Amino acid sequence: MQALVCQSAAAPALFSAEGMVGVIFLLTVVLVFTGALIAVNAQRLVRAVAGLAVCFTGLAGVYYFLLSPFLAMMQLLIYVGAVSILIAFGIMMATPEEKRVTGMKSRSLLAGPLAFSTGALMFAALTVLGLKTEWQVFPRQGTGDIKAVGMALLTTHSMVFELISIVLLMAIIGALVLAQRGRN
Amino acid sequence: MDTSIWRALFYLVGIMAFAGLNAAYLGWCERKGAARIQRRIGPCEAGWAGLAQPLADGLKLLSKQLLVPQGVDGIIFRVAPVLAMIPAITSMVVIPFSGNIEARAMELSVLLLFALASLGMIAILLGGWASGNKYAIISSARAVSQNLAYEIPMLVTVITIVMISGSMNLREIALDQMGGFWHWNIFRLENGHFLTMWISFIIFFICSVAETNRAPFDMAEAESELVAGFMTEYGSMGFGLFMMGEYLNIVVGACLTTTLFLGGWDCPFGKTPGVWWFLVKIYILIFTFIWIRWTYPRTQIYRLLNLSWKILIPFSLANLLITAALIKVF
């Protein structure tokens, strides 16, 4: 974000290289927010999943701007290509009724105002924090290439790596157990 | 790297033209190929040997009304065909057609291609679901489960290539195979890789046939069971875009197979490497796709999934282990 602020302070011409980069960055941000809003507000679940996929795609763009193309690709491959698809699959298997009415069902009159004030408070606090903090520009660490990522995974973060593999193993065993039970 | 606007424009126009021509004329090739295999003549009225047929088809599709049936999810229904097309064209940006013809040099181009392929899957899913038609929904569920199943062995075999070449850059993978067919990954003599690489190639090729939803794995549009699958409700250019996306996916798959296994733009005898060899190789592969489609009957969905989960995935994992061992031993 700091880079963006710097750019807008210097106000580069729209059709210069920096200007175009800024425009593309803003487009990815717009993509993230549009996707998120669709995901939250859509009446049909499939549209919500589509919005989620759009949001994830935008996030991949943001990662690319943060000079980590590997993370961007993984975001596309895993979140757009697998997680969204799995959610869509879940919707297909469950076949919920279309257009289920959401909202306006709360029991208490206070729920709406309370939620709104909590949200507004959070927003205000974060805004103040964002504006008051002395942001530092960190120098780029490493080259962000896949070799460095692999090295870090197997040395510095090997514990996390192993733990994730245990989680995956448990998920596989769980899936097997569930499938076996379904068959009998 | 040269960043002039002209270079970008040149590649933009070039890739669009390549994609458009392929999407149009592969349809012609397929019809001609099918006809020859079935002892017919195929298109022959429009132009010499029916060569103007794609133009006529395009004109017809463009001039038809864009029909949105009642009860479909309008926005998604309209967006899905476009979504099927975009990733396929975008994939061509990172494909190295020859030593000096590559739109964008990128470190992780292999990964980008697979990421884009998974985006194409979403188009089918959304298109089928938005149609609000039983056939279309069954078809999109099939397409997705098939694509998910075949993506795994495909990625695992690609990992073997990445281990051998030590890079995820398609250009470097191709450069690693220069100097005659005995350097190509499929026949590679060094380190005894020829022992396992042909298995990798077969697995990869089967997966790419399945990933592009081609017969004998075209469960998603099985005409005899599902009318036309996710395309049932689509007419005019919506249908046209889905078809074009399908053909472009075949082109991208052939380009990927060529670059990963068949030495990219390298000459088999190490004499005159260049873009012509790349084109020869991809069109031989595309012909094989057509050949397979009109030779083998369609399988069934559970056989298809069994093939992936019970045969291809174990084989590709064993293959990965053996390749890693070969790299360590030699």
Image (spheres, coloured by chain):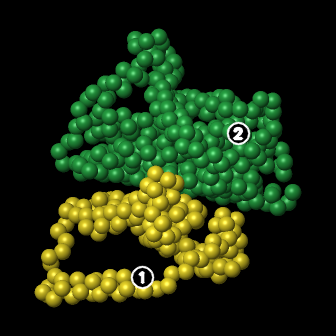
Chain colours: A yellow, B green
Residue that protrudes farthest toward the left in the picture:
A109
Image vertical order of residue B223 relative to residue A158, above or below: above
Q: Which residue is mark 2?
A: B99
Total number of numbered discs in the rendering: 2
Observer able to see residue B320 = yes
**Which residue is drawn at the image coordinates 19% and 66% (left, top)?**
A100
Mark 1 falls on what kind of element? helix
Residue that protrudes farthest toward the right in the picture:
B330
The kind of residue tagged 2 is Gly
Side of B251 relative to A55 (left or right): right
Marks 2/1 in contact by CB < 8 Å: the verdict is no
Q: Which mark is residue A73?
A: none
Image vertical order of residue B87 relative to residue A100, above or below: above
Residue B148 pos. (x, y %):
49, 55
Q: CA distance from mark 2 to mark 1?
A: 48 Å
The kind of residue tagged 1 is Gly
Image vertical order of residue A86 relative to residue B289, above or below: below
Observer able to see residue A79 = no
**Which residue is drawn at the image coordinates 41% and 35% (left, top)?**
B243
Both on one chain, marks 2 and 1?
no
Q: Which mark is residue A130?
A: 1
Side of A37 relative to B86 (left or right): left
Image vertical order of residue B271 relative to residue A31, above or below: above
**Which residue is drawn at the image coordinates 55% and 80% (left, top)?**
A136
Mark 2 falls on what kind of element? loop
**Which residue is drawn at the image coordinates 75% and 32% (left, top)?**
B273
